[in-house]
Amino acid sequence: MIPSPSANLEDWTAFFQKEVPNHVTETRFQHILRVANYAESLAKIHNYPVPKKAYLAGLCHDITKQKKMEIHSELFQKYSVDTTGIPSQALHAFSAPLWLEREYGFLDSEIAKAISSHTLGNLDPSLLDKILYAADFLGSDYALRQPALSEWVEKTEENLDYGVFMKAFQTIFFLMEKKEVIHPYTFHTYNQSANNLKETK
């Protein structure tokens, strides 16, 4: 049963823990759980006031990742969202908050912004935006295969900008190898996190 729009975080989290697996593969759901756990952990370490909200953002961030293009297009049309210049691999980040609102009546502007930003980054990231962006990298299948993962986690716990930088760096590297277009938000996120890291040395 869908919680009421005014339900608390615990009720929504319990609901989406059962609901999200209906929309993704088991492999994708395992990624989602890793991201949610990293997000909650980073939220506690970096003094985000509501760590459970960070977990919920992680739990919902990829709910439309494996939806067909028609679903994304339908949502963007219904909510009048202009996706010009958004790479196809990032569309789910923008459709997920819309899906959450349309299908379940769940609307939290802070979570929505973090989810929308978790693939490309954005020009003015909040603390939750950065937490989910970094958690998405640490919880990725790519990171899971790397011997350096524990070091990356430790450095992100020390400085959140490290995880943000690593995600932006790997995204740019991956897209350049494939000769794909790179969104300006991703370059901005890379430059901003790199500068922040330099300032803390």
Image (spheres, rainbow, N blue to C red):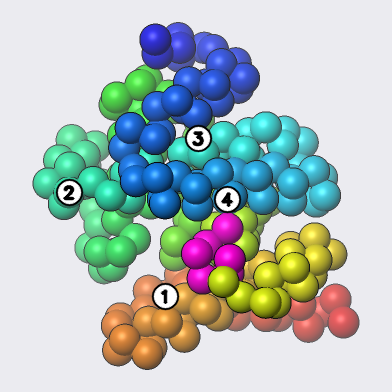
In space, the residues marked 4 and 3 are separated at their CA atoms by 20 Å
Q: Can you identify the residue that label 1 sits on? A: 184
Residue 101, image x, y percentages = 35, 28
In space, the residues marked 3 and 2 are separated at their CA atoms by 25 Å
Residue 126, image x, y percentages = 63, 51
Earlier-in-chain disc, 3 versus 2: 2
> What residue range appears in magenta?
139-144
Q: Can you identify the residue that label 4 sits on? A: 35
Q: Can you identify the residue that label 3 sits on? A: 109
Q: Are marks 3 and 1 in contact (CB under 8 Å)?
A: no
Q: Secondary structure at mark 1?
A: helix
In space, the residues marked 4 and 2 are separated at their CA atoms by 23 Å
Q: Quadrant of the N terminus?
A: top left
Q: Are marks 1 and 4 in contact (CB under 8 Å)?
A: no
In space, the residues marked 1 and 4 are separated at their CA atoms by 24 Å
Residue 104 in view (yes/no): yes
Q: Can you identify the residue that label 2 sits on? A: 68
Q: Amino acid at mark 2?
A: Lys
